[in-house]
Structures are given as C-alpha cells and as structure tokens.
Amino acid sequence: MKKIDISVIPGDGIGKEVMPEALKVLETVAEVHGGLSFSFKHYPWSCDYYIEHNKMMPEDGLDQLKESDAVFLSAVGDPNLVPDHISLWGLLVKIRREFEQVINIRPAKQMKGIQSPLVHPNDFDLIVVRENSEGEYSEVGGRIHRGEDEVAIQNAVFTRKGVERAVEYGFQLAQNRRGHVTSATKSNGIVHSMPFWDSVFESVAEKYPDVKTASNHIDALASFFVTRPQEFDVIVASNLFGDILTDVGAAIMGSIGIAPAANININGKYPSMFEPVHGSAPDIYGKGIANPIGQIWTGKMMLDHFGEHELGNTLLQVIEEVLQDGIKTPDIGGTSSTTEVSDAIVTRLKTLK
Ligand code: NAI
Ligand code: MG
C-alpha cells in the first residue's frame, strides 16, 4: 500500500467549502486505485485563527507541515478580518519561500463541457512553468528623496541557478508531453536579464535535442494565448511574465474557479504545495455555489506529482464527463451546487472500481 501524508489547509472563505469536496474525491480515487491511501492532517490556519492567536500559524507551523509529503491548500485571505499583506505573507508566501518552492506550474486546457470566452478556442492544452523565487519579484531596491524629487529603484534578480532549474523543469515536463518548449522573453527591451535568460534557455535546450523550442517576446506571447493557444505545449517564464501569462491562461479556460496550480520544491528538502489559482471569494462564500473543480484538479496535479499519472488523467476525464452532463456551478453557466458537482464526480469514479 502506497501511503501519502498530506497537510490540509482549507484557509478562508470558499476554501472551507471546496476543500472537503476535493478530499472526498481524493478518498474515492484511492478506493478506485486499491493500492493507494491518503492520510490527511487538518490545520485551521486562516484569518479566523489570526483573530484568536494574533498570527496566521503557530511558531512551529512550518515544522509541523515539514513532516508531510505535500501541502494541500485552498485559499487564504479575508480582507474584512485581516489585511491581505498580513494573511498572505503570514501563511501562503511563508510556505512558498521557506519550503523553497522555486517552481510554479499552472496548466490551462480547453475543457470539454465548458465554454471558453475565445470564439475559436480550438483544442488548447498548455502548461506554464513560472520561476517562483526571484526575477522581478525581488526585495532589492528602495526609494529616496520622498516627494517631488523622489526616485524608486526596483532591481530584478536573475541567477544562473534559478533560471536553469526553471527552464530544466520545463524541458523535463515537455518530454512527457508533446515535446515543445516556448521561452517567454523580452530581450529586445530588457537588455541585461533577458539576454541572460535567453542564453541559459539555449544552453539547457542543447541537452534536450528531442525537444523543439521557440522563443517569443512576452507581449506577443500574451496575445498568442488569445489568438492561437493550441500551438503551445510548455511555456517557461520568469516570475512576473509567468504571473501574467497564467492569469490569461485561467481566463481563456472560462473561469478562475477551475484553474489549478502547484508550487514545487525540487531539491526534495521540503514538501511541495498544491493550491488552486482562485482566492477565498468572499462575494460567494456561504452560498454553496463555489466551483470545486479548481481544488479537485489541483488534487489531480498532486497525484501526478506522486507518479500517479494514469489515475490523474482518469480523474480529469471524469471531471470533463460531469461538465459535459451539464453538472456545473453558476460561474461556468450551470445551476448546480458545489456538492452536486463533487458528488457527481465521486459517483462516476465509483463506477470505475
Ligand atoms: P478571488 O479569486 O477570491 O475571486 C475573484 C472572483 O472570482 C470573484 O468574483 C469570485 O466569486 C470568483 N471565484 C473565485 N473562485 C471561484 C470559484 N471556485 N467558484 C466560483 N467563482 C469563483 O479573488 P479576490 O476576490 O481578489 O480575493 C479574495 C481574497 O482571496 C483576498 O483576500 C485575496 O488576497 C485572497 N486571494 C488568495 C489567493 C490564494 O490563497 N492563493 C489567491 C487570490 C486571492
Ligand atoms: Mg496572479
């Protein structure tokens, strides 16, 4: 029996609604598999926890999480209770940073049964590999001369190690997909870091002669996501470029409520963290209509991470079948509730046993 220990953090708002549904689905997936079992350890860390303890997690919170094989998180943030910079930096960002989750991956796919806002969505199925630890999101810089003569300097930091491991990850993914990697660059405008990025990309590419490559400037690339997303397989991008591209990716799928993501630790020292793209959606919290698919698909990425690709693909197929049956939450044009969607997925999975 393969046993996977998972730390579960539902967090705030709809996180508390979609997480139980995703766990229900994962339990069923384990039953269908027969040789797999999950052990879930629940952590109540959230804005409510902050109100009670004046911190988002206990001092030894990371040590507790470190014991598990993966962290499964939903959404953090409730601006009515705690300012976002405190809640997100006190939990989510802390885990990403301290656990050296240096790669962020986000797939975007034309899902059967969901209407993409694109007029001709064709059949896109791509994945963005985003550098998650440095680049444009650095703390290097500062501001001087407040007021009229003010100067602000924000330095981007690109290290050979950081770029190499992100690009390398992209090539390895591509080998198990359609064998194509696109680099998001901007070496025509950003004249130091981006030519450096390009040169690292080229040198990594030489190690993968079987993988085809392309390089696009980020502005053009963002527009191609809209006009011909079907041409992309794996895209590797810096922190900022990846952030923007993945939002475009979620948008062309049809709803942020279905978009999954993973923060990957690649040195094996700490667990990776799996979390959907969406936040805590205070506007719909409590109505029972949150789309659980983002969280469930994120669970599929966790299955992939533990080598259960076949099972992961089966789960994704079942999700699409349920969508095609019209069992959908309102954000994607349906009238079903959160639990109706996950129950339908569970029921279908059980027929596979
Ligand atoms: P959001 O993603 O929570 O909501 C944006 C819009 O999408 C809302 O209209 C919401 O109803 C809808 N939506 C989101 N997820 C949905 C789902 N599963 N089903 C149906 N509709 C869904 O972003 P927002 O409103 O900017 O942020 C709310 C809170 O969440 C803030 O505190 C923010 O900081 C936090 N947040 C946390 C994230 C995380 O934990 N990774 C990511 C994004 C935001
Ligand atoms: Mg973003």
Image (cartoon, rainbow, N blue to C red):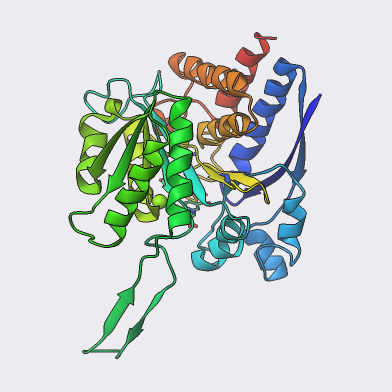
Q: Give the residue drawn at x 62%, y 60%.
A: 98
**Where 290 sits versus 65, above or below?**
above
Q: Residue at horizontal 52%, vertical 31%? A: 293
Residue 81 seen anywhere in this rendered image of the structure: no
Residue 51, quarter of the rendered image? bottom right
Instruction: Measuring from the top left, give residue 215's x and y in whole percent.
Output: 26, 40
Location of the C terminus (image quadrant):
top right
For the point 68% across and 56% down, the residue is 45
Q: Please identify the quarter of the rendering in which residue 129 is found.
A: top left
- Give x and y (percent) for residue 94: 59, 61
The N terminus, quarter of image: top right
Q: Is residue 195 above or below residue 217?
A: below
Query: Residue 132, position in %: x, y?
Result: 47, 53
Residue 63 coordinates in the image, percent (x, y):
75, 58
Q: Residue at x 65, y 32 (%)?
A: 306
**Viewer-proximal residue among 309 and 185:** 185
Q: In the depicted view, which residue is nearer to us: 243 or 271?
A: 271
In the picture provided, is 171 more to the left or to the right than 267? Answer: left
Residue 75 in sight from this viewpoint: yes
Count of numbered marks: 0
25 sits to left or right of 253? right
In this rendering, the answer to whether 299 lies above or below 124 is below
